[in-house]
């Protein structure tokens, strides 16, 4: 499933340096919710990720967020 992860430039640099995103990896199911989160939190970068279809829902967040409790390895940046 395609999800949208909201982050900052500083965190993106860390992700690229390490080659992964440390858990918990939170992401939105649709771009509209990711954009709303981006504006409200001041995180200007939105990454498109692929989560497994059975990734657990994150409680709250309009029932639109997913979370992974393992490292998300970056393949293409």
Image (tube, rainbow, N blue to C red):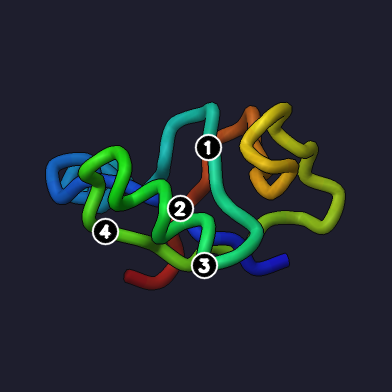
Mark 3 near mark 4, Cβ–Cβ under 8 Å?
Answer: no
Q: Is residue 16 left or right of residue 65?
A: left
> In the rendered image, which residue does mark 4 sit on?
45
State the image coordinates of residue 42 (x, y, percent, origin top left): 21, 43
Q: SS class of the residue under badge 3?
A: helix
Q: Is residue 42 above or below residue 58?
A: below
Q: Quadrant of residue 26?
A: top right
Judged by depth in the image, the label closer to the viewer, 3 or 1, is 3
Mark 1 near mark 2, Cβ–Cβ under 8 Å?
Answer: yes
On residue 31, which mark appears? 3
Q: CA distance from mark 3 to mark 1?
A: 16 Å
Q: Residue at x 41, y 47 (%)?
A: 37
Q: Is residue 54 left or right of residue 43?
A: right
Q: Residue at x 22, y 55 (%)?
A: 44
Q: CA distance from mark 4 to mark 2?
A: 8 Å
> In the rendered image, which residue does mark 2 sit on?
5
Q: Nearer the viewer, residue 65 or 22?
A: 65
| The N terminus, quarter of image | bottom right
> In the rendered image, which residue does mark 1 sit on?
25
Q: Residue at x 53, y 37 (%)?
A: 25
Mark 3: few/some/many CA within 10 Å (<14, 14-19, 20+): some
Q: Residue furthest right?
A: 54
Q: Is residue 10 left or right of residue 40?
A: left
Choose the circle earlier in sequence order: 1 or 2.
2
State the image coordinates of residue 6 (x, y, percent, origin top left): 38, 50
Q: SS class of the residue under badge 1?
A: strand
Q: SS class of the residue under badge 2?
A: strand
Judged by depth in the image, the label closer to the viewer, 4 or 1, is 4
Mark 1: few/some/many CA within 10 Å (<14, 14-19, 20+): some
Choose the circle earlier in sequence order: 4 or 1.
1
On residue 6, which mark appears? none
Choose the circle earlier in sequence order: 3 or 4.
3
């Amino acid at each position: 499933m395609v999800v949208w992860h909201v982050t900052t430039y500083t965190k993106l640099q860390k992700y690229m340096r390490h080659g992964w995103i440390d858990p918990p990896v939170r992401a939105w199911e649709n771009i509209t919710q990711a954009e709303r989160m981006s504006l409200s939190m001041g995180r200007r970068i939105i990454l498109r990720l692929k989560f497994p279809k059975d990734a657990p829902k994150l409680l709250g967040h309009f029932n639109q967020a997913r979370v992974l409790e393992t490292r998300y390895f970056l393949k293409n940046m």
